[in-house]
Amino acid sequence: MATSDSRVVDPGTDRGKPGDQPDGPPRPSTSELTARAADLAPLLRANAERGERDRRVPEQSIDALAEAGLFRLAVPRRYGGYETDMRTMLDVAATVAESDGGTGWVISLCNVGAWVIGLFPEAAQDDVFAADPDARVCGVLAPTAEVTRVPGGWRVTGRWYYNSGSLHSSWAVLGVPITDDAGTVVDQGAVLIPMSELTIEDTWFVAGMKSSGSNCVVAEDVFVPIHRFISVPEAIDGTIDLARPDETLYRSAFVPMLSLILVGPLLGLGRAALRHVTEKASGKPVAYTFFDTQAESVAFQLQLTDAALLIDTGHLHAYRAAADIDETAARGAYPDYFVRARIRADTSYVAQKITHAIDVLMFAHGAASFADVNPLQRIWRDAGAGARHAAVVPGVSYEVYGKALLGIDEKITPLV
């Protein structure tokens, strides 16, 4: 059995050297893009309560994000996008989520949806981005559909829960089963369908991430041409035939990208909670004590430190996972199973540490945390909902990584 150290030293298998990046608009730096997101903070915060009430991000916020170019992070440069990297996508999502978790969740899912389009044939990419580099893409990979092969493509009927960003998207990437002539499922794919050919069923009645508008998307006998299809197993294994293999971003590992993107908003929510509690500490007493302010209390200081270090830990693991994805893609390689298992565990560890930190901060701040006027209660609920995404919860992720550490060749999920 190879040791874990030997596997970490070799994070991927060679898929060829990267070529020159295609011509396109200048790519803004990560700091510039996060600064654009930070500049929108007053608007996003002002709209947060309305978004939660309406169960959708206000269009004013969506329009402002689009005008700032923050939906272009994963759009190919040849279409006018920025074609950034995983680290940038995390940092932008976190900065947006510091202002509002639901808005951060929507921009995260739409940006990774745009990234998935980069895996499709070029004709499908043209369908989405040629006329509109700001086109937004939502998606659900669960193959909850029925498909029939017809000349030139498939007829698709299905329902997909829960489709974050669907209220603001023009396209959807949706999981479908692939069957043989006998109707037996033999493979899984993903198809690209215009939202104009789908309907949205209003099902998103939840306790957290209310403004993400993650409703059910429904297809009724929709025709999907063959060029709007990819094989999910090929995407997972890194064997998909990329239309533009010289574009570094789209060589990134499939499941690590789709899972790690989910904790970007959690990082921002953790920072927002820490900032709020810290700012209030000098003017808020500790109830039923002689402390005039929380800041005077050693017990409070220790709680604040505990939460800050938990949030720092979450960032460190998120950034290590992002570096694994970005650096391997830049080498023209694909991370091996061990590294992908570690990224999945890192992702869950981030969620666990951030939600723990927010719990600590809620105890430190006190019962006022749950007042409707206090943003902490929305931060707490949004983080709690986001951290329970099936690709993020720790149980499966830790078992996957534990087996990889031990060299146990037993797969419990294909999503690694």
Image: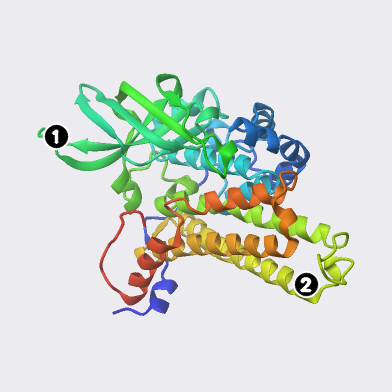
Looking at the picture, tell me which residue is in the foreground, 229 or 263: 263
Place of residue 196 in the rendered image (x, y in percent of width and height, measured from the top left): 45, 19
Distance, label 1 to label 2, CA atoms, is 63 Å
Which amino acid lies under the numbered mark 1 shown in the image of this protein?
Answer: Gly
Visible residue check, residue 7: yes
Horizontal placement of 321 versus 239: left or right? Answer: right
Quarter assignment of residue 122: top left
Residue drawn at (55%, 25%), measured in percent from left and top?
A: 132
Q: Quadrant of the C terminus?
A: bottom left
- Residue to which mark 2 is pinned: 301
- Residue to which mark 1 is pinned: 183
Residue drawn at (62%, 39%), measured in percent from left and top?
A: 103
Q: Earlier in the sequence, mark 1 or mark 2?
A: 1
Q: Quadrant of the N terminus?
A: bottom left
Place of residue 255 in the rendered image (x, y in percent of width and height, measured from the top left): 40, 52
Horizontal placement of 185 versus 250: left or right? Answer: left
In the image, is residue 296 above or below residue 186?
A: below
Q: Which mark is residue 174?
A: none
Looking at the picture, tell me which residue is in the foreground, 236 or 327: 236
Q: Count numbered badges in the picture.
A: 2
Visible residue check, residue 265: no
Which amino acid lies under the numbered mark 2 shown in the image of this protein?
Answer: Gln
Judged by depth in the image, the label closer to the viewer, 1 or 2, is: 2
In the image, is residue 140 above or below residue 395?
A: above
Residue drawn at (35%, 30%), measured in percent from left and top?
A: 228
Place of residue 357 in the rendered image (x, y in percent of width and height, measured from the top left): 63, 64
Q: Secondary structure at mark 1?
A: loop
